[in-house]
Image (cartoon, rainbow, N blue to C red):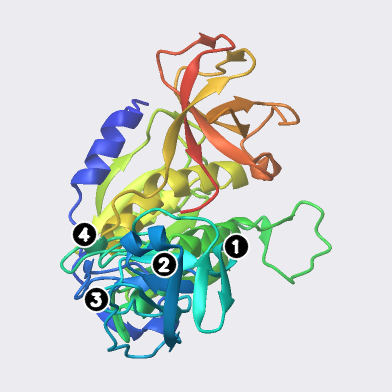
Amino acid sequence: MDFLSYETSQNMLELLQVNSKRFERVPLSDALGRVLASDITAEFNDPQFATASMDGYALKHEDLASGVISVLGDNPAGHDEKREIKTGECIKTFTGSMMPPGADTLIQIENVTYEDGKITINKVVALGNAVRPIGEGYKSGDILITKGTKIGFAEIGVMAGLNQVMVKVAVRPRVGVIATGSEILDLGENSDNPAQIRSSNNYTLEALFTSAGAEVIQLGTAPDNRDELMETFETALASVDILVSTGGVSVGDYDFVKDIVPRLGAEVVYKGVGIKPGRHILVAKKEEKFILALPGFAYSSTVTGILYVLPLISKMLGKSAPYKMVAAKLQENFKKRSRFTEFTACNVVVEDGEYMINFEGKKVGSSAILVNMLNDSALMVAGEEDKFLEAGTYVNIILLESF
């Protein structure tokens, strides 16, 4: 069987047209984890007026040389201060307060001695000390958060400061997930048959796709029965944007998924990619919907879910990238096990600002070992042409910390 190269498969995936223009408006309090559908632009300066950044006395810098300055009174935060500072005068001004007109510097309380309505300067400060200038944080018209950004705590805070009550976000693509195979048991099911195994794929993928911003429809498990699978797929495809299955895509007598997809009226974009794990992956499209049939082993389905499903979710949300890929240095030798592009779980650490990887504690075996992705793991990418990589070689890794 001829396999598509990994690079070609990714290029073809990138060229697929998706509906990425759907959006809705949600309250700011509900926007955490959503993806922005439009840029967030500042409508005013921050701060809008020169602001004290500490408690002290607002004055003219040139007056510090006099040594003693008269205090006109207090200027608490939130007070619309109108008094103008003249030569030889100051106003006690608190953190966050508007600087009084005429003042260009704030001297901290600890740098002066107050007595009988005057302050004595004990330590001189620089011009503009402890004063936040207009527009220090941002200026009117600045694009503060770009379209496609996944909203986190900082984005929430910035938008709250802009009085962004409602936020325009991308509609979450709906992803249906189903694990196929008569040998698997769904969560909570029990069996006296020792040949059956516990299904984890559908729950792993549900968590993966949810973390990437999708709305996931959990479809559970389905046995290796062509008619039942056909009905399940047809029903699911009516209500999702992407249907993801695991199992049934290889060349076995009971691998029915690969046969069902064309019968659903879907066009097979490609089947079989030169990657390890997951070379029997199938990608198909029916109108604006997608079907991705992934391998049945836990590690294989997770890796191919990252490589092929996350990019589609990312495109539908308008995100710039589905995951973060960085260069890292090998801390030990690595020997590739196949002629394909390999994705190997590795430990990742940062030393002196540089990503370093090793394989300590990682099990070598089949594509079923999901525990290799626990802890601070990443996926190391070794190309088709790579055979033996020496310690110190730089390789690309996909970080698994967030999507």
Q: Which residue: 29% across, 64% down?
A: 133
Answer with the quarter of the image where residue 86 lies: bottom left
Image disc number at residue 106: 2
Q: Is residue 179 visible?
A: no
Query: Mark 3 or mark 2, which is nearer to you?
Result: 2
Q: Earlier in the sequence, mark 3 or mark 4?
A: 4
Labels 3 and 2: the sequence-earlier one: 3
Proximity of marks 1 and 2: CB atoms separated by less than 8 Å = no
Q: Examine the rendering and report whether any part of residue 10 can be seen.
A: yes
Kind of residue at disc 1? Tyr
Asked whether disc 2 touches disc 4, contact meaning CB atoms under 8 Å apart, the reply is no
Q: Earlier in the sequence, mark 3 or mark 1?
A: 3
Vertical side of 331 occupied by 362: above or below? below
C-alpha span from label 3 to label 2 = 47 Å
Q: Mark 3 or mark 1: which is in front?
A: 3
How many numbered markers are drawn? 4
Residue tagged 1: 203
> CA–CA distance between discs 2 and 4?
56 Å
Among numbered discs 4 and 1, the one appearing first in the sequence: 4
Looking at the image, which residue is at 25% across and 65% down?
A: 135
Are circles 3 and 4 on residues that touch, CB within 8 Å? no
The amino acid marked with disc number 4 is Val
Residue carrying label 3: 23
The residue that label 4 is drawn on is 18
Report the Cα–Cα distance between label 3 and label 4: 14 Å
Where is 12 relative to 389, above or below? below
* Disc 2 residue crowd, few under 14, some 14–19, many 20+, Cα 10 Å: many
Tell which tag, 1 or 2, sits nearer the viewer.
2
